[in-house]
Image (cartoon, coloured by chain):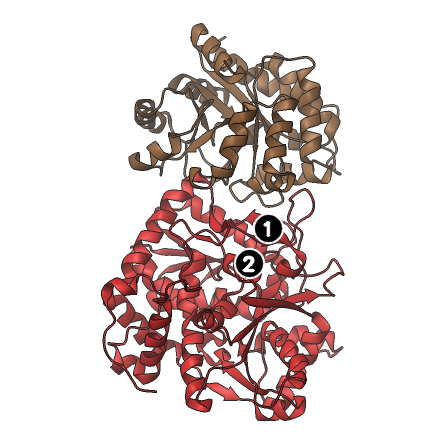
Chain colours: A brown, B red
Amino acid sequence: MSRIARRFAALKAEGRGALIPYLEACDPDFDTSLALLKAMPEAGADLIEIGMPFSDPSADGPIIQLAARRGLKAGATMPRLFEMVRSFREQDADTPIILMGYLNPIEAYGIDRFCVDAAAAGIDGLIIVDMPPEEAGPMQAPARAAGLDIIRLIAPTTDDARLKLVLNHASGFVYYVSITGITGTRSASDEDLRAALPRLRAATDLPIAIGFGIRTPQQAASASRIADGAVVASALLATLAETLDGEGRATERTLPDVLAQLRELGAAVRGT
Amino acid sequence: MRVNRRLPRMDALDKHCYTARPDTSAASGGLNTQAGMAAMTDGARVNSLRSGPDASGHFGDGLGGRFVAETLMPLLLELDAAYKTAKADPAFHKELAYYLKDYVGRPSPLWFAQRLTAECGGAKIYMKREELNHTGSHKLNNVMGQILLAHRMGRTRIVAETGAGQHGVATATVCALFGMQCVIYMGATDVARQAPNVFRMKLLGAEVVPVTAGAGTLKDAMNEAMRDWVANIHNTYFLVGTVAGPHPYPAMVRDFQSVIGDEVKVQMHEAEGRLPDVIVAAIGGGSNAMGIFHPFLDDPSVKLIGVEAAGHGLDSGKTAASIERGSRGVLHGNRTYLLQDENGQIIEAHSISAGLDYPGVGPEHSWLHEIGRAEYVGVTDDEALEAFQTCTRTEGIIPALESAHAIAHAVKIAPTLSPETLLVINISGRGDKDIFTVAEHLGVKL
């Protein structure tokens, strides 16, 4: 059983959903983002998404765009991201790590080599924003051989016929993009989410995580109950950005502020 | 050439690039009719180079495609279906032919550039006068087709990206004509260097949104237009201005622009009784070049040359030559040649011409490059400026800086060619918008 499957099974036994925070590699610098990554499980993260910065994140809103820019400025590359995960794995063998990013940096690294190196570093799953199932062919076999889950995105616009295609070959969990829009802009209501889930449940046995537009502890708690997990990205990155100095460098507030917010989210998801 | 007014078979239409349907004689006249038949005959050939892309939008070995977030996939499939339906509908072709003739002002002339020919001393130079279209460039050919499609699809709001502002102006123009809401994303750098076009768009009722991300040029405007579309899919149509982006845009924009090459084929036959030998066109995303190249892809005697903006020089690091200095990658929904670093991050392009200042190129051009059917070369900022002046002085035609790149290369090769060689330059746009940029480079204060 993969780390992702084990974690969702354990949470199900506990009777709650997962909290899945996001951080951008090397935002605002390598050491700070590594320290943040290492501190996340203790602060409430059940799974962690690490964003690989891309120069042209066309599916992302302004908050993640800026985070990506800071990450690139601080020298984020695929090898640096792998280095972060390797270091994290020295202390944590259980928390699943998902790499989220755009296809071009992966292709530039080389798809086969990427899958091997990502798995070796301790990455468990991939969310590739601009790789719909129709274009996933070249990634499928190397990812499976390396034991990496390709996590599929489902959107409110995905109709029933398409749902089958998207879920074919899906593994790990399913990521439900809860709004039609870019990251960090607006939120779906609980009613929308409750209405959307049965259709997905009927189509897959995989755990379902909800992302896009989840900001507050209340939203995270309710999304993690309606589905099996809640992804929080822009809200944490916005907090991180607020703590930076005039030159965009980390300050003494950076880690504590982001982790404090994560603890609140974690407590809400755990119902404590 | 005999005018053939026989209707093509309906099942054939779907396989072919767009051409005005020949049953619109009142609106299109003989020229469009002949051009249409020429294109349809060619497109029907087995092993035609004109039959791409495949059903999933790929050219050759994996170029093109649909690399977008899942939210957009159903919309692209809907667009693909709507375009296929329109393409098979004679009423759509009739309507488009009407607007192309009476609103755009087609056909555009094929002009024998006698003085430029004499000055170069070699090939006989013709100019395809796309700058004479309404709004001053080839852009309206595509925009006219897509606005009719958007209208059919019931969309009420149009978003578009623009570099030089030519596509933005064309889009704002048809939105005014059809009473649609129009939002144009334009890089902040381009807003500054293309002020006249920004004002034009505003006069036409469009909202112009300056984009400050990145270098504030076309690539950044494209990102922002995609973000707008994904957030407003219920009423919004994304009107892409070039032969790039996710399928079906590269094929659809090419089809609408192929009217350029279809006309050249007929006009050259009327003028010289044969096919041209060389066709030269500038390439940013590549829509004017694809429009004039595509009808000639199956005529191997016709040499096709795409001129990229070399900027300060191909090896200066300040260039927009995606084919010559780029490599395969995925950006803006398609796999194509891109300017990128070893980590797959996109590099900012540079060109004096805002319309060519893009780090990618349409996937079909990448394919034509890989199979060697078209040749791609670079022309620097300085060479384009020189050609801009040469064309203006010898022909009395002020070309767009984009088109000046094509002229520069034509002027370079014409002396090496025999006087029997027929060379066509696509004058994709007029240069009025560029006079401030040119004045600045010539040290003239306006």
Residue drawn at the location 34% of the way across and 75% of the way down: B36
| Closest to the observer, B212 or B199 | B212
Q: Position of residue A83 (x, y in %)?
A: 71, 26
The reply to whether label 2 and label 1 mark residues of one chain is: yes
Query: Are dots 2 and 1 in contact, CB under 8 Å?
Result: yes
Residue extending farthest top: A14
* Snapshot quadrant of residue A174: top left
Residue extending farthest front: B46
Q: Secondary structure at mark 1?
A: strand
Residue drawn at the location 32% of the way across and 73% of the way down: B20
Q: Position of residue B38 (x, y in %)?
A: 36, 76
Q: Position of residue B279 (x, y in %)?
A: 54, 76
Position of A30 with respect to A113 (left or right) is right
| Closest to the observer, B61 or B152 | B61
Position of residue B283 relative to residue A103, above or below, is below
Tell which circle, 2 or 1, labels the residue nearer the N-terminal end.
1
Other residues around mark 1 within 10 Å, as few (<14) / some (14–19) / many (≥20): many
Position of residue A146 relative to residue A264, above or below, is below
Q: Which residue is mark 2?
A: B366
Task: Look at the image and tell me whether residue A257 can be seen.
Answer: no
- Mark 2 and mark 1: Cα distance apart in space: 9 Å
Q: Mark 1 falls within which chain?
A: B
Position of residue B166 relative to residue A7, above or below, is below
* Kind of residue indicated by mark 1: Arg
Q: Secondary structure at mark 2?
A: helix
Q: Position of residue B356 (x, y in %)?
A: 60, 65
Q: Which residue is mark 1?
A: B328
Position of B50 with respect to B380 (left or right) is left
Residue drawn at the location 63% of the way across and 52% of the way down: B327
Task: Look at the image and tell me whether residue A249 can be seen.
Answer: yes
* Snapshot quadrant of residue A243: top right
* Kind of residue indicated by mark 2: Ser
